Image (cartoon, rainbow, N blue to C red):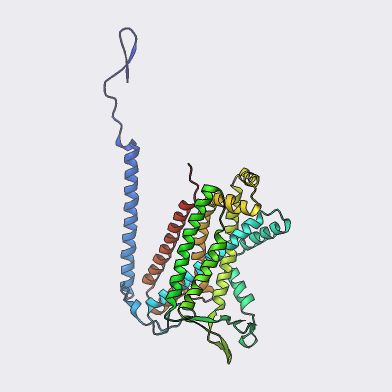
Amino acid sequence: MTAQTPDNRTVASTAPGPRESWIYDPKLRGYLSQIIVVGLLLWGLYEIVVNTQANLKKLNQSFGFDFLSQASGFDLSTALVYFSSNSTYGRALWVGFLNTVLVAVIGIFLTTILGFVLGVMRLSKNWVVSRFATLYIEIVRNIPLLLQIFIWYALVLKPLPGPKQALNIANSIFISNRGIIMPHPSFGDSTWIAILMLVAALIGTWIYRRWARNEQEKTGQARPVWLVSIPIIIVAPVVGLLIAGWPLTWDYPELAGFNFKGGMTLVPEFIALLLALVIYTAAFIAENVRSGILAVSHGQTEAAHALGLDNAKTLRLVVIPQALRVIIPPMASQYLNLTKNSSLAVAVGYPDLMYAGGTVNNQSGKAIEVFSILLIVYLATSLLTSLFMNWFNSRMKLVER
């Protein structure tokens, strides 16, 4: 407030002004709105719990996880660990989770490779290569994933010949409508020596890679990292097997009647799901790679060429490291999508977590408990994947000096 002095000068008044109402305090209103929202959420959760308890009481059912120790009474076509109809419901869910992890890990690995190749191909100066990558991306990503799974399963894998007319590769690998049957490795008790040698080789190559990078930063001379690392990783476990007396044996498949005996089988359901997930997700990752490469200034490429680097080294040493800061965040989303989309395996009967959970629910009638487990497992898997990708992104981002 201001006031006039006798000589007509304006001075600030020390008298207190009108007091503002607490309603107009933005900080207080922010706290109040948050309290109201949290209160509404707690009230909604309370109503859900009360309503669920009332419905369970009407159905003469109780909430609990004791059913997980009961015998399942059904079989699963694919299991990474032992499972039979006498196994428990809890083990059935564990087998389904392992099958989901198997598809997700292999799918992420193959999708990353295929997506990077397609992304680079689309930027190629070769017209045929560029148009092929563009056509692939635009067609594949606009066909629903579920339809692609059905195409691979019903139109590609199921029409294959039966076991007696199976495609034979060196009398060791057989391809039929029962899947891909291949030799199964069996390891003896002394295999730990080969595993120890492999771990030592991995640690040694990691140390050598760090040394090579430091030497390149000091002297500018590049060291052959991959040409040294790959032979060491391959030779080390072989040497370990030789030291252990070669405890590795192979169980080869043989045709017995109308099916194969021995070996291990990749069932058509697994192959169809994996192919569809990899081919579909790679189209989106290819676009992420393309956008990341285009985000790198063309001056970086010109500078690399001026230093004498060819196109391959320019892409690998200059462009890709800078493009990763753009590529990694959306790629993490695609990894999450691939893992969650694997739940479509139920459409072709592959026993993933969703398939096993649905079967357990139908057998036990414990819908709330079963789907609560599925929700927590999928949520935890997604959060762990996001945590790892965020850590990897922080490691790969450009550091300003």
The quadrant in which residue 380 appears is bottom left
Q: Residue furthest top?
A: 7
Q: Residue furthest left?
A: 15
The quadrant in which residue 44 appears is bottom left
Q: Residue furthest bottom?
A: 257
Q: Residue 157: x, y in percent?
A: 62, 77
**Residue at 37% in and 80% down:** 88
Q: Residue 173: x, y in percent?
A: 60, 81
397 vs 102: above or below: above
Q: Residue 43: x, y in percent?
A: 32, 57
**Residue at 65% in and 59% down:** 138
- Does residue 10 appear to the left or right of 202 in the view shown? left
- Does residue 102 appear to the left or right of 156 in the view shown? left
Q: Is residue 112 visible?
A: no
Q: Residue 198: x, y in percent?
A: 47, 69
**Residue at 45% in and 79% down:** 244
Q: Quadrant of the N terminus?
A: top left
- Does residue 74 appear to the left or right of 125 in the view shown? left
Q: How many marks?
A: 0
The residue closer to the viewer here, 381 or 123, is 123
The residue closer to the viewer here, 239 or 150, is 239
Q: Is residue 191 visible?
A: yes
The residue closer to the viewer here, 116 or 362, is 116
